[in-house]
Image (tube, rainbow, N blue to C red):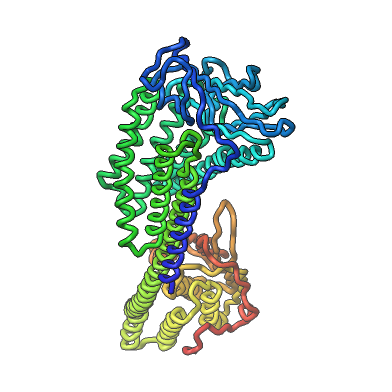
C-alpha cells in the first residue's frame, strides 16, 4: 500500500511539472504595439565609429530588437541611440511605454525633449539598470500623428547592457504588463533569494551539528545561488564595477557544481571522479569569473559554459539512472527535481537563442531552482527522519542490551551474595570450632584432669564447669544474636552472668544508653565483645573480692569522631596492671579489643578498678537505638533462647 501511494504521488508530481512547462512554453507575449525595430546610431569609445562589421554601418541604420550590447559589439564600451516612432490613435488617451530591460545607463527623449534619465554617461561604477523593468508615461501628443522616441543607452563591456523590444499603448493597457514584469523579475527574485538563503543557512546549521559533507554542499550552493539571484534587486549596485559583476558570476558558477555534487552525494555517488571534478569547478569559479569580467575574453565564457553543460549532463544521467533503479522515494524525488531544472535550463537557452524577446526574458531556471531547493530540502528532512528513527531503534537496542547486561550482573551479584553467605557460614563454623577447641575444649580437659586428682574439691570443679557452660552459651548466643547490635550483645552477657554475680554477692548496676548499630559487624565481632566481657567478669568474680560492680555504655561524639565507650568498674581490692600475673588476661582482652578495631584502657587501685573499651563507630552506622525496658531488668533473656 505504501509503495502504491509513493508511485501515485510521483506520477502526479511529474504531470504537474509537464503541465507547468507546457503552459509556460506556449505562453505568448501580451502587447498592444510591439516595437522590435529601431534606427541605431553607434558611438564606440566616445567617437562616431565605423562599423565593426558590414551589417552595422556608421550611418544610422535599422536594427532588430532586442539589442544585446555584449553580443553585438563585444569587449568595447560605447553608446547606442535607438530612434523609433510610437503611433498615436487617440491624442486624448494617455500613452505609455514599457521597456522590460534597458541599460546600463540611459536617457529617454520624446520629440527631442528629455523625458527620463538614469545614471551617468559613460556608466558610473554603481549604475546598473539592466535587470529592472522600466515604465514611462509619454506627454500628450497634441495631434494624431506618431511621436518620435529616442532611447540612448550607455553600455560597458560584460555588463549585459542593451535594449529589449518596447511595448507601447495606453496607460490602462501598459500598466498591467509592467506590474506583471516587475512582480516576476523583482518580487520573484526577492522571494527566491530569501528562500535560497534560508534553506542554505539551515543546511549549514545541520552541517555544523552533524559534519556530513552532503549538507555542506547544499548549504553553500543555496547561499551562493541566493547571492546570484539578488543581483536583479539592485539598480544602484552595492559594489563598484567590475566587482559587482565578478561576485554574482562567481556565485552562479560555484553554486551549480556544488548542488550537482550534493545531488550525487544523496544518491550515494559523492566520492566518484565526477563529484571531485565538480568540486574543482566550484573552486575555480572565482578565478574564471574574475578573468571573464575584468579581461573580457569572448571565448572564455562559452567554453566554461560548455564545460558546465557536460558536467551537469553527466550528473543528470547518474542521478536519473539511480532514481529509476532505486526503490528509495527520496532518490525519485531528487530525480524529478533534477529533470525539472534541466528542462527549465533547456527552455531558457532555446528562448534566448531564437526568441525576439531574448534580452528581456525572465529565466525559468530561477523559479525551477526553488522547486529543486524545496525538493532537496525535503530530501534532507527525509534523511533526518530516517536518522532519528535509526537513532530511536539504536537506543531501543541499547536499552535492551543494557537491561540484559543488568540482569546478568544481578545474577552474578546474587551468586556472589550466595557465595559470601556460604563463605561466612564456613568461616563461622571454623571460628566456632576453633573457639570450642581452644577455649571450651581446653577448659574441659583441665577440669577432667582436676576431677581425676585424688581429693579434688567438687566446689572448684563445679565452678569451672559453670564457667564452661556460660562460655558455651555465650558462643551460641553470638551465633544467633543481632549482628552489629551492641546493646543486645551486652544484654546476653548480663543474662548469662547476672545470676552468678548475685550468687557471688556482687551487686551489678547496669547503665546502657542509646547505641547505634555497628555496620559491618557479624556474629564474629559480637562474640569477640561477649568473650572480652566474659573474661573481665570472670576475673572480677574470681579475684576482685568486690561487693559492687557497674557496666555503662554510651555514645560519645567529638572532634569529628563518634565512638561507643563501654566501661566496667568495681570496688574490689584492685591489682597491679603491670604485674606479670595480670599480663595474660589483659593481653587476651586487648587482643580482642584490637580485633574489634578499638582500644582497651585499664586503671586499678585498691577500692576501684576500671576497664574502658573504646569502639569507633563507622560513618555509615545507623541511628542510635533506644534500649528496651527489659535491659533494666534482671535476668534478661538473649535473642536465642535455645540454651538456658
Horizontal arrangement in the rendering, residue 179 relative to residue 291 (left or right) = right
Residue in view at x 59 percent, y 60 percent = 556
Rendered view: 83 above or below 471: above
**Which is more toward the observer, 513 or 82?**
82
Please state the horizontal and vertical placement of residue 345, each as a whole percent of the image. 41, 44
Name the outermost residue toward the front. Answer: 144
Horizontal arrangement in the rendering, residue 6 relative to residue 29 (left or right) = left
Please state the horizontal and vertical placement of residue 341, each as a whole percent of the image. 42, 48
Residue in view at x 58 percent, y 21 percent = 150
Rendered view: 11 above or below 292: below
Rendered view: 199 above or below 145: below
Horizontal arrangement in the rendering, residue 273 relative to residue 86 (left or right) = left
Name the outermost residue toward the top. Answer: 47
Residue in view at x 52 percent, y 28 percent = 130
**Which is more toward the observer, 140 or 320?**
140
Q: Quadrant of residue 7?
A: bottom left
Please state the horizontal and vertical placement of residue 191, each as a whole percent of the image. 56, 43
Name the outermost residue toward the left. Answer: 273
Q: Is residue 520 visible?
A: yes
Horizontal arrangement in the rendering, residue 143 relative to residue 514 (left or right) = right
Residue in view at x 39 percent, y 51 percent = 338
**Which is more toward the observer, 476 or 93?**
93
Q: Quadrant of residue 511?
A: bottom right
Rendered view: 417 above or below 51: below
Q: Is residue 238 visible?
A: no
Amino acid at each position: 500500500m505504501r509503495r502504491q501511494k509513493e508511485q501515485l504521488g510521483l506520477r502526479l508530481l511529474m504531470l504537474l511539472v509537464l503541465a507547468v512547462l507546457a503552459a509556460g512554453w506556449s505562453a505568448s507575449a501580451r502587447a498592444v504595439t510591439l516595437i522590435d525595430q529601431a534606427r541605431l546610431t553607434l558611438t564606440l569609445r566616445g567617437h562616431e565609429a565605423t562599423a565593426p562589421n558590414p551589417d552595422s554601418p556608421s550611418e544610422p541604420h535599422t536594427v532588430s530588437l532586442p539589442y544585446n550590447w555584449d553580443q553585438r559589439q563585444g569587449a568595447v564600451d560605447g553608446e547606442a541611440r535607438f530612434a523609433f516612432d510610437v503611433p498615436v490613435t487617440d491624442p486624448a488617451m494617455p500613452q505609455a511605454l514599457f521597456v522590460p530591460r534597458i541599460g546600463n545607463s540611459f536617457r529617454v527623449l520624446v520629440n527631442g525633449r528629455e523625458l527620463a534619465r538614469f545614471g551617468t554617461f559613460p556608466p558610473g561604477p554603481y549604475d546598473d539598470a539592466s535587470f529592472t523593468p522600466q515604465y514611462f508615461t509619454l506627454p500628450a501628443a497634441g495631434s494624431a500623428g506618431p511621436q518620435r522616441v529616442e532611447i540612448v543607452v550607455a553600455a560597458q563591456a560584460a555588463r549585459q547592457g542593451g535594449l529589449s523590444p518596447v511595448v507601447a499603448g495606453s496607460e490602462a493597457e501598459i500598466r498591467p504588463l509592467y506590474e506583471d514584469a516587475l512582480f516576476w523579475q523583482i518580487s520573484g527574485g526577492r522571494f527566491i533569494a530569501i528562500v535560497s538563503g534560508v534553506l542554505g543557512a539551515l543546511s549549514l546549521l545541520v552541517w555544523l551539528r552533524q559534519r556530513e559533507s552532503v549538507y555542506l554542499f547544499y548549504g553553500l550552493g543555496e547561499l551562493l545561488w541566493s547571492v546570484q539571484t539578488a543581483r536583479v534587486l539592485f539598480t544602484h549596485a552595492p559594489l563598484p564595477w567590475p566587482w559587482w559583476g565578478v561576485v554574482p558570476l562567481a556565485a552562479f558558477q560555484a553554486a551549480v557544481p556544488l548542488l550537482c555534487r550534493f545531488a550525487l552525494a544523496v544518491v550515494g555517488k559523492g566520492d566518484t571522479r565526477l563529484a571531485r571534478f565538480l568540486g574543482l569547478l566550484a573552486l575555480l569559479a572565482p578565478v574564471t569569473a574574475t578573468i571573464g569580467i575584468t579581461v573580457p575574453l569572448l571565448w572564455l565564457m562559452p567554453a566554461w559554459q560548455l564545460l558546465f553543460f557536460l558536467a551537469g549532463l553527466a550528473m543528470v544521467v547518474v542521478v536519473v539512472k539511480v532514481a529509476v533503479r532505486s526503490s528509495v522515494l527520496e532518490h525519485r524525488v531528487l530525480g524529478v527535481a533534477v529533470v525539472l531544472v534541466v528542462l527549465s535550463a533547456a527552455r531558457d537557452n532555446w528562448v534566448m537563442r531564437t526568441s525576439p524577446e531574448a534580452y528581456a526574458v525572465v529565466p525559468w531556471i530561477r523559479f525551477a531552482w526553488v522547486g529543486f531547493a524545496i525538493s532537496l530540502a525535503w530530501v534532507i528532512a527525509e534523511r533526518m527522519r530516517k536518522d532519528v528513527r535509526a537513532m530511536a531503534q539504536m537506543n531501543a537496542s541499547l536499552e535492551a542490551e543494557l537491561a540484559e547486561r543488568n540482569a546478568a550482573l544481578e545474577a552474578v551479584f546474587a551468586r556472589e551474595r550466595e557465595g559470601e553467605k556460604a563463605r561466612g557460614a564456613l568461616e563461622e563454623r571454623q571460628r566456632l570450632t576453633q573457639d570450642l577447641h581452644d577455649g571450651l575444649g581446653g577448659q574441659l580437659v583441665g577440669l577432667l584432669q582436676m576431677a581425676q586428682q585424688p581429693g579434688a574439691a567438687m566446689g572448684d570443679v563445679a565452678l569451672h564447669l559453670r564457667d564452661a557452660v556460660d562460655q558455651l552459651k555465650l558462643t551460641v548466643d553470638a551465633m544467633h544474636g543481632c549482628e552489629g547490635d551492641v546493646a543486645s550483645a551486652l544484654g546476653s552477657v548480663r543474662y548469662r552472668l547476672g545470676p552468678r554475680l548475685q550468687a557471688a554477692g556482687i551487686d551489678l548496676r547496669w547503665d546502657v544508653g542509646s547505641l547505634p548499630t555497628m555496620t559491618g559487624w557479624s556474629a564474629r565481632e559480637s562474640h569477640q565483645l561477649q568473650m572480652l566481657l566474659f573474661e573481665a567478669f570472670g576475673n572480677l568474680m574470681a579475684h576482685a573480692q568486690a561487693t559492687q560492680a557497674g557496666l555503662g555504655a554510651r555514645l560519645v561524639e567529638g572532634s569529628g569522631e563518634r565512638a561507643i565507650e563501654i566501661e566496667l568498674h568495681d570496688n574490689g581490692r584492685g591489682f597491679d596492671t603491670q604485674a606479670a600475673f595480670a599480663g595474660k588476661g589483659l593481653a587476651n582482652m586487648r587482643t580482642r579489643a584490637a580485633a574489634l578495631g578499638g582500644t582497651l584502657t585499664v586503671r586499678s587501685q585498691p577500692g576501684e578498678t576500671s576497664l574502658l573499651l573504646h569502639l569507633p563507630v563507622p560513618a555509615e552506622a545507623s541511628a542510635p537505638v533506644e534500649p528496651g525496658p527489659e535491659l533494666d531488668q534482671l535476668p534478661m533473656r538473649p535473642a536465642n533462647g535455645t540454651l538456658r
